[in-house]
Every structure is written in structure tokens, then in C-alpha cells.
Amino acid sequence: MSIRLRPTEAILAINHRCNTFCVMCDIWSTPDRHELPPEWYRRLPPSLKSINISGGEPFMRDDVPEIIEVLRERLDNPRVIFSTNGVLTEKIVEQTVDLAKRGPIAVRISTDGVGEEHDRIRNHKGCFDKIMHTLDELKKAGMKDLGLACTGSKDNPGALLRVKELAAELKVDFVCSVVHSSELYFGDQGDMVPRDAGTRSDLIQIATRQLRSKRPKDWFRAYYTDGMIDYIDGKPRRVPCTAATNHIHVDHKGVVYPCNILNRPMGDMNEVTWEDIENDPNTLDVLAAVSGCQLQCWMSCTVAPGMRTKPADPVRWIATRWLAGGKPRSEV
């Protein structure tokens, strides 16, 4: 039986190599030189609207612009977001600025602390200075859609709030998450999840500031940030997961997964087409696995599509919290 799947968002891991050595990700420890040629990306489903280009470190490839041009030819003017460690300043600036002249491009630079704290988490001396230089050069070149992305872990307590304040000072966007384990992507990081009172308090402060913002987009981010507290508290996720339906993850070898956490392959697109995947009985099993998933992850790549699918839930939460004085929850 054919299943009509029209995902609108995807993470493309275009390589499996990295030039930083992060404590909360094992990609650097298992490098793999296999990389798909740009033309391969014409195989992706044409329904995609938003593409997160990731890795490894994507800018370790020299043909990133060619990949984006193929995506633009295949898709309908997709928004492209680069997730980068920000170290390769010259390549990042040259390639993203040129691409931004012909379509929407965003850059999110991983920033897991301020100063030496970030260098320690990334195991890369001088990394923080390099990413600040990259951000400054991108601004000088006229790039607008810029942001810092912080991942909270047991090794960087307080970093989420510090990076949030840094982003506000630099007048760039801020996104955050906490450590997740993934046997197909990050590796086993279960002992890195921050469950301390300080991280919980920082998330409350971040969500409070987002909730009291004048931008509606920030109100929904407050809902997402508050959901991270449920995640570190071990509570069930508050919105249904629409992985595989609205979101897919494609690894560096061309295997499609519903997301970057659940290790249930949907198909190898070197061997099958997207239409084949829709007609494969295995896809029903994958959808059932997503529906019954007990991993309870809380990452924006799958949470955001779920929020858009059931917008009444976050809207109701936002309205309730406004009535409570614009604070998401108690410190206790």
C-alpha cells in the first residue's frame, strides 16, 4: 500500500568528518571519507522546504556550493541553514555570502560556551576566537540570518544562559538544545545530559526572556525551551513526533532515517527512489516505530514540525503563561 509522505524539512549530513573534537559528539572519533556527489541530491523528495546542512563539519567539503545549487534546482527555493563549528572562516564566508545572493541562507555557529570554556568543550585551542572572527566577517559581508547554537551538557554548566546573553549582545539569533544520544549520529552521550538545578534554572530564565519578547517567534521558542526542562526531568515529550512524515534525516552515505536519533532506516536512496520508499511495507513499520518511540527526544528538528502540526497546544501554553505573568514555570 502506498503511503503519501511529503516531508518539508530535512537534515542532510553531507559528510562524516570534523575538525573539532567535541565532548558531546563522537563523529570526529569515527571519520569516514565517503561523500555523495552533488548530483546525488536530486534524489531527495521535492516537497522539502527547509534544509539543514550538517556533517561532521560541512565546510570541510570543497563542493558545498554545488550541492546547494543542485538542491535549488530540485526544490522550490528552499531555505538552507548551515550548522557549522565556524572554524573555517574563509571558506564559510566566501561560500555562504555568494549563495545568499541567489536564495535564503542562514548560518548557525555552534557555540558551547564563552572564551576558553568553548575551546575546552570543542577540544580546539583558539576555537572561540575563530568563530567570533567568522561571525564578524559574515556580518561585514552583509549576511543577515546569523545565529549562535548552544548545546548544554554536564561539562558546560551555565553555558546556555551565557551564550544566550552573548547572542543578544551581538544581535544575532540564538538556538539551544541539550545533549542527546544517538547510535546513528552523536554516539552514546547518556551520561552527558545535564540534569542539575542550575541548567534547569537557566532554561527557565531563557524561556522567560523569550516569552516576554515582542517577537511572536520567540514565544514559540519559549514553549520549545520549556519542553527541554521536561526532557532533562525525564518526562514524556509534549507534542507528537512527526519524524518521517514531516522531517527526514539523510546520512552521508544516502540512507534515509526519520530523524537523527531513531535508528530505523527508511531506505538507501542509492538503491531506491523516494517513491519506492513510500511504497515499501517497511515504511509502515518505521511510522509505527516513530509513533511508539520511547526515546522521548526533544530537538528542534522534530519538535518544530510537530508544533506546526498541532499549533493549538503551544498557543494554549503561551496564553496560559501570559496570564501567569510571563513566566514559564516555577524555579522549584
Image (spheres, rainbow, N blue to C red):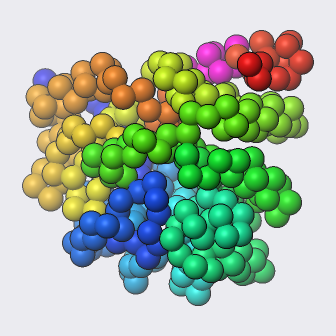
Point out the residue furthest to the bottom here. 90
Q: From this view, report whether residue 94 is shown above or below residue 7.
A: below
Q: Can residue 225 be seen in this view?
A: no
Q: Which residue is drawn at 24% across and 40% down?
A: 263
Q: Where is residue 166 in the image (x, y as percent from the top left)?
A: 79, 59
Q: Is residue 312 magenta?
A: yes
**Residue at image coords 62%, 34%:** 196
Within the image, what quadrant is residue 267 found in?
A: top left
Query: Residue 176: horizontal and vertical position, in percent?
Result: 62, 46
Residue that appears at 39% across and 46% down:
189
Relative depth, front residue between 323 and 163 = 163
Q: Is residue 226 visible?
A: yes
Magenta stretch holds residue 198: no
Looking at the image, residue 24 lies above or below residue 332 = below
Report the side of 262 relative to 307 (left or right): left
Looking at the picture, does residue 24 appear above or below residue 146?
above
| Quadrant of the frame with the N terminus | top left
Q: How many labels does the image show?
A: 0
Q: Quadrant of the C terminus?
A: top right
- In this picture, residue 59 sits left or right of residue 108: left
Task: Tell me where the magenta segment starts and ends, as one range.
Answer: 310-316
Q: Is the magenta stretch mostly helix, strand or loop?
A: helix
Q: Residue at x 79, y 35 (%)?
A: 205
Q: Where 247 sits versus 250, above or below?
A: above
Left or right: 233 with respect to 158?
left
In percent of width and height, residue 298 lies at 50, 33
Which image quadrant for residue 134?
bottom right
